[in-house]
Amino acid sequence: MSVDVITFGCRLNAYESEVIRGAAAQVSGDIIVINSCAVTGEAVRQARQAIRRLKRERPQAQIVVTGCAAQTEAASFAGMPEVARVLGNDEKLDASAWAGGERIAVADIMASTMLKPHAVDSIAGRPRGFVQVQNGCDHRCTFCIIPFGRGNSRSLPVADVVDQVHRLTVHGACEIVLSGVDITSYGADLPGSPKLGALVKRVLNEVPELKRLRLSSIDSVEADADLVDAFATEPRLMPHLHLSLQAGDDMILKRMKRRHSRADAIAFCEQIKRLRPDVVFGADIIAGFPTETDDMFARSLDLVDDCGLTQLHVFPFSPRPGTPAARMPQVARDIVKERARRLRDKGEAALRRHLDGQIGAARLVMTEGGSAGRTEQFTAVRFAAPRAPGLMLDVTIANHDGHNLIAA
C-alpha cells in the first residue's frame, strides 16, 4: 500500500496534505491524491493535466481528487474516467471519509462552523512546519471562488495553536508558518474574539524554543495593533510579509470589493518599515481585472515602488464561473497577458535590486537541505556545498544569480 499526495496551490494545502497522508493511511492499494487548487482556471487545468498524466504513468493506481477545485467542481472531476473518488475539503481531513466507499463525498462546506485541530508532527522531514490557524473567508471579493471551496471563516482556538506549534518544534521544526485562507480575520468566531496579534504573542511567549515564526499572506487593512507591535518588538517574528494587495488603483479595488485603498496599502508598508527597517514585502497582484484601463494598470505597476515590494505573485485575471467579476466587461486576453508580463518584469527588477543590496551583508540563514536556505527575510540562499537541514548559520552574502543569494 502507498499513498502519494500531489499538492497544488497554497501553504494551507501543503499543511493539509500532511494530514491527508495520515487520514488515508488505512486505504489499501496504490493511491494517488491530487490536493487541488481553484484560485485560477489555470490551476484547475493543471490539476486535470496531472490526473491524466499520472494515470498513464501508473495505470493501476487509484486517483482521488480533493481540495478546493474538487469542492467547487466535484461532478466535473468525477466525470473524468481517470478519477476513482472525489472528496471535499472537510472530508479529505477525516479518516472515516477515506474509509468510506462513496465515489463523491463532498458536503456543503458552508455548513462547516468549526475548525478541528489535526496532530501533525512534521512536514515530510523539513525544518519548516505549517500550522493551520484559520480556514474559510467571510469576504466576497468579486474575483474569488475560494470562499465556496473553503466555506466561512473559522478559527482554531489559541491553546490548540500553541499545542501544535509546540508539537512541531519538539519534532525538529526550527520555523513555523501560521497559515490560513484569511488569517487576519483570525478569532472573530472564538470566545472573546482574540486577534491574530494576540495569537502571535502567545505562541512566542509559550513556545520559547521556537526559533522563527512567520505568517502566510495577510490582508494588511485587517492587521491589528498587537500584530503591528509584534513586528516592532519580537525578533523571532520574521521580517517578511506577503500582502494580499491585488491592485493599485482605487476604482479597481472597489470593483474587486476589496477593503483597502491604495493609500491604505502604502501607509501600512511605510508604518511597518519604520518599525522594522529590515522587513521585506511580497504581494499578490492581478493583471487585467475587468474594466482595467492602461492608467489603472499603471497604478498597479507604480505600487511595486510605492510599497517597496520585492517579491510578486502575478495572476493574469482568470474569470471564475459563478463570481461577479466573470460577468463584468472583460479585458482582451492578449492585453491581460501583456500586463502580466510587465508586472513580472517589474517584480524581477525589484527582486534584483533587493538581491543587489544584500551583497556583503551578514545574514542568519536557516538551511533547508541540499544547498538551499532562507534568510530571515525569506530570501533564498544557495551554498557551494550541501548542508544538513535545520541549521542556523551566520552567513556573508557574496553574490546572487538573479533569483538566489549566494553564500560566501
Image: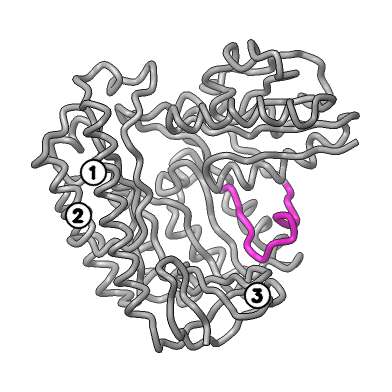
Name the chief secondary structure element in magenta: loop
In percent of the image, x 35 and y 71: which residue is there? 279
**Residue 245, position in %: x, y?**
29, 47
Check whether the beta carbons of the residues at disc 2 and disc 1 lie within 8 A of each other: yes
Residue corresponding to mark 3: 209
**Residue 382, position in %: x, y?**
55, 74
- Placement of 393 over or under 117, stated as above or below: below
Give the CA separation, mark 3 to mark 2.
38 Å
**Residue type at mark 1?**
Ala
Q: Nearer the viewer, residue 70 or 384?
A: 384
Circle 1 crowding by C-alpha within 10 Å: few under 14, some 14–19, many from 20:
many
- Placement of 326 over or under 211, stated as above or below: above
**Residue type at mark 2?**
Leu
Q: Which residues are magenta?
A: 119-132
Check whether the beta carbons of the residues at disc 3 and disc 1 lie within 8 A of each other: no
Give the CA separation, mark 3 to mark 1.
39 Å
Residue corresponding to mark 2: 303
Q: Secondary structure at mark 3?
A: loop
Give the CA separation, mark 2 to mark 1.
8 Å
Q: Secondary structure at mark 2?
A: helix
